[in-house]
Image (tube, rainbow, N blue to C red):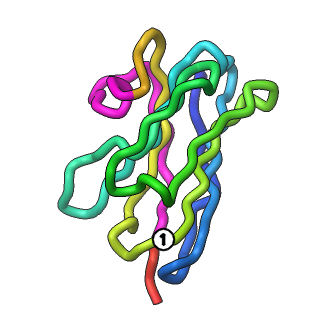
Amino acid sequence: QLQLVESGGGLVQPGGSLRLSCAASRFTLSSYTIGWFRQAPGKEREGVSCISSTGDFTYYADSVKGRFTVSRDNAKNTVYLQMNSLKPEDTAVYYCAAHRFTSTQSMCARIVVNYWGQGTQVTVSS
């Protein structure tokens, strides 16, 4: 079965950092635009950051600009989200998603994608 698997979530204090990873199983990520989304309790899912298939183009939501960095290593079939200066409002379940033939900004606005991961919990709390 084709799937995406996120890892790297956890509990961190405000101001701390985490790096999330998104790995693909049984398919190659290199031809997909990848997005990181998050959903907090009682809120809609939002696109946080997206990266083009080659890694040349990235998009960030205003809420994370300057704090989060998305990158990818196609040789390792993995996409990363480095999260620095974390705030309590960053607490959410984080999902990665893959979709073909879409721009980074469009990717982060998508509801329907080719593949979703199962999510990883990020909790920012003292």
Q: Residue at x 59, y 22 (%)?
A: 2
Q: Nearer the viewer, residue 62 or 41?
A: 62
Instruction: Relative to 57, say whether 66 is above or below.
Output: below
Q: Residue furthest top?
A: 101
- The spot of residue 123 in percent (x, y) is 46, 72
Residue 103 lies in the magenta stretch: no
Q: Residue at x 30, y 27 (%)?
A: 110
Give the amino acid type for the residue marked by disc 1 in the picture: Leu
Q: Residues within 10 Å of mark 1 (few under 14, many from 20)?
A: many
- The spot of residue 83 in percent (x, y) is 55, 60
Residue 103: image quadrant is top left
Instruction: Relative to 76, say whether 6 is above or below.
Output: below
Q: Residue at label 1?
A: 86
Q: Residue at x 45, y 76 (%)?
A: 124
Q: Residue at x 48, y 81 (%)?
A: 14
Residue 76: image quadrant is top right
Residue 122 lies in the magenta stretch: yes
- The spot of residue 72 in percent (x, y) is 67, 34
Q: Residue furthest bottom?
A: 126
Q: Quadrant of the N terminus?
A: top right
Q: Is residue 100 found left or right of 105 in the rendered image? A: right
Residue 102: image quadrant is top left
Q: Nearer the viewer, residue 68 or 125?
A: 68
Q: Is residue 22 found left or right of 40 in the rendered image? A: right
Segment colored magenta: 105-123
